[in-house]
Amino acid sequence: MERGSARGLLLKDKSTERRGSIRFPLILDLHYVVGQGASREKGLSRIIELSSEGLSFAAERPLPIGQKVDVSIDWPVSLDQGVALQLSMSGWVVRSNGSVVALRIGRYEFRTRRSGVKAAPPDEAGSS
């Protein structure tokens, strides 16, 4: 194989990649919570990259490595009939460079999200 071939470069680049899954750049708002009880701190941020194993985002301040973080993201795609989704996850900080934080995801799940639609009052609901 030639040293300068595209295949050789691809293999070389892949060997230096430490991540086990592909990360996708996304621009979505993210809510996060660190700490528990009285030391609980909430923040609003934006995703930089997301994969099935990790997440990076711009936090309001650097977070310590090993810190557990709970995250929720209003997912941009709805279920059938327009049911809004929220991606909830928790993980641990594995890297923090200034305000850019990288998490290793430990748990994640999609949940249905409450919409802004309010039910009709009982007296109006029964009349037709």
Image (cartoon, grey):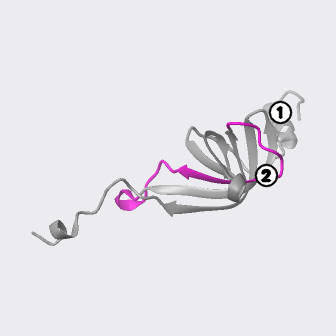
Is 82 contained in the magenta span?
yes
Q: Quadrant of the C terminus?
A: bottom left
Pinpoint residue 55: horizontal percent, then vertical percent: 69, 47
| Residue at 55% across, 41% down | 28
Q: Quadrant of the N terminus?
A: top right
Few, some or many C-alpha atoms within 10 Å of disc 1 (few <14, some 14-19, many ≥20)? Answer: few
Cα distance in 3D space between marks 1 and 2: 37 Å
Q: Which range is magenta?
A: 60-83
Q: Judge from the rendering whether residue 40 lies leftward or rightward of residue 122; answer left or right.
A: right
Question: Which residue is identified by label 1?
Answer: 9
Pinpoint residue 45: horizontal percent, then vertical percent: 61, 40
Q: Quadrant of residue 118?
A: bottom left
Earlier-in-chain disc, 1 versus 2 = 1
Label 2's element?
A: loop
Viewer-closest of 9 and 42: 42
Pinpoint residue 37: horizontal percent, then vertical percent: 69, 59
Viewer-closest of 115 and 3: 115
Please tell me whether mark 1 or mark 2 is closer to you in this view: 2
Question: Which residue is identified by label 2?
Answer: 67
| Residue at 82% across, 45% down | 64
Pinpoint residue 107: horizontal percent, then vertical percent: 69, 62
Disc 1 residue type (three-letter): Leu
Few, some or many C-alpha atoms within 10 Å of disc 2 (few <14, some 14-19, many ≥20)? Answer: few
- Is 80 located above or below residue 21 in the figure? below
Q: Which residue lies most toward the front here?
A: 38
